[in-house]
Image (cartoon, grey):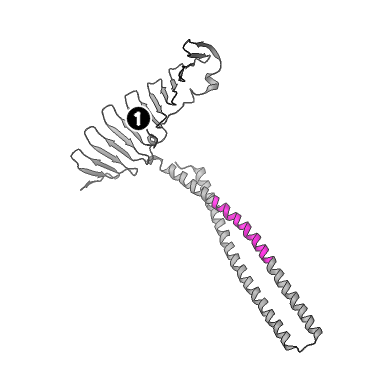
């Protein structure tokens, strides 16, 4: 089921993105209009200079009128230049403001993409098996690994001559620290965990499940009560070894490869398509709609 809250958030980001894109378009239009105004002002300034030059060449009017005209022309030129400088400063301020909005739009775009990916994963979670992710990783159940609950007071502590220290807590938890830096914790219901000096970890659960974590290669081996062995490798690949000899390999992308004891192999893709190869070498593809095709 799709998270409605996530969808509403997606719609909000889409709307905000559209508004910012519209502002960016307006910014481009304003930039074009600014260029046009600047070109017009330069043209007017050029025309005024040509008129001033013609007036100087005519020498028809007196010196006083020439000086007055010159002052008027100079004043007009300064006014035009001041307007240009003011327009440029105002436009630069406007651009800086819009650039900040565009940068914000880029952040929203990233948030939008992340939200789309989150919704996609929720819609397609069935294509990514739980087995290939966290289920077979080393885990520390909160019911056992709560120090405030279990280490709430020491009932007794025994120190052996060989250096071993055994601590019994009021909660019923027992902790044994061996001289060679190995620590074993035993809980009232039978759960035990051992921390080895090489950072390996071993867990025994009350239901009979055994978990061993190989620190050096970042691999977890789980042995179920029925004898099924599950290996979870650092790459995310999971292998299941059944008691009867069958094997199942789950790759990081969700593809499943099943190998039967009789030699039959089945490869299941995330789309539901299956490729079946029999011991005689014949291969068939089985599609989700039930149709079958032989591979020649």
Q: In terms of image quadrants, where is residue 57?
A: bottom right
Residue at left offset 54%, top offset 20%:
149
Q: Secondary structure at mark 1?
A: strand
Side of 26 relative to 283 (left or right): right
Residue at left offset 23%, top offset 37%:
264
Residue 115 horizontal/vertical position (percent): 49, 46
- Find the residue positioned furthest to the right: 64
Residue 68 horizontal/vertical position (percent): 79, 81
Residue designated by label 1: 230
Side of 44 relative to 109 (left or right): right
Side of 4 relative to 233 (left or right): right
* Region of the chain picked out in magenta, as a range: 86-107
The answer to whether residue 186 of the structure is visible from this angle is no
The answer to whether residue 277 of the structure is visible from this angle is yes
Magenta stretch, main secondary structure class:
helix
Tell me if residue 183 is in the magenta stretch: no
Tell me if residue 95 is in the magenta stretch: yes
Task: Say if 289 sits above or below 168 in the image.
Answer: below
Number of labels in the image equals 1
Q: Badge 1: how crowded within 10 Å, few (<14), some, or many (20+)?
A: many
In the picture, which quadrant includes the N terminus?
top left
Residue 9 horizontal/vertical position (percent): 53, 46
Q: In terms of image quadrants, where is residue 260?
A: top left
Which of these two is toward me, 176 or 87? 176
Which of these two is toward me, 26 or 12? 26
Task: Say if 62 sits above or below 276 in the image.
Answer: below
Residue 132 horizontal/vertical position (percent): 38, 36
Q: In terms of image quadrants, where is residue 269?
A: top left
- Find the residue positioned furthest to the bottom: 60
Task: Say if 236 sits above or below 109 in the image.
Answer: above
Which of these two is toward me, 131 or 223? 223
């Amino acid at each position: 089921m799709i998270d409605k809250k996530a969808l509403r958030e997606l719609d909000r980001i889409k709307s905000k993105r559209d508004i910012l894109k519209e502002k960016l378009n307006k910014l481009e239009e304003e930039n074009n209009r600014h260029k046009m105004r600047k070109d017009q002002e330069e043209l007017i300034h050029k025309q005024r200079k040509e008129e001033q030059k013609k007036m100087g060449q005519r020498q028809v009017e007196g010196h006083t009128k020439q000086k007055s005209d010159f002052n008027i022309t100079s004043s007009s030129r300064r006014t035009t230049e001041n307007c240009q400088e003011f327009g440029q400063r105002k436009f630069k301020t406007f651009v800086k403001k819009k650039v900040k909005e565009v940068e914000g739009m880029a952040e929203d775009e990233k948030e939008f993409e992340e939200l789309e990916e989150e919704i996609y994963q929720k819609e397609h979670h069935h294509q990514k098996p739980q087995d290939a992710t966290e289920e077979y990783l080393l885990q520390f159940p909160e019911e056992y690994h709560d120090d405030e609950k279990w280490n709430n007071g020491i009932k007794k502590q025994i120190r052996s001559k060989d250096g071993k220290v055994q601590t019994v807590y009021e909660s019923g938890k027992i902790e044994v620290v061996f001289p060679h830096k190995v620590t074993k914790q035993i809980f009232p219901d039978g759960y035990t965990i051992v921390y080895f000096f090489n950072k390996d970890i071993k867990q025994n659960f009350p239901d009979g499940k055994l978990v061993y974590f190989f620190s050096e290669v970042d691999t977890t081996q789980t042995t179920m009560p029925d004898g099924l062995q599950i290996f979870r490798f650092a790459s995310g690949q999971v292998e299941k070894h059944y008691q009867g000899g069958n094997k199942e390999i789950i790759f990081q992308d969700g593809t499943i490869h099943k190998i039967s004891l009789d030699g039959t192999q089945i490869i299941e893709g995330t789309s539901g398509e299956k490729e079946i190869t029999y011991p005689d070498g014949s291969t068939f593809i089985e599609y989700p709609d039930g149709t079958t095709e032989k591979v020649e």
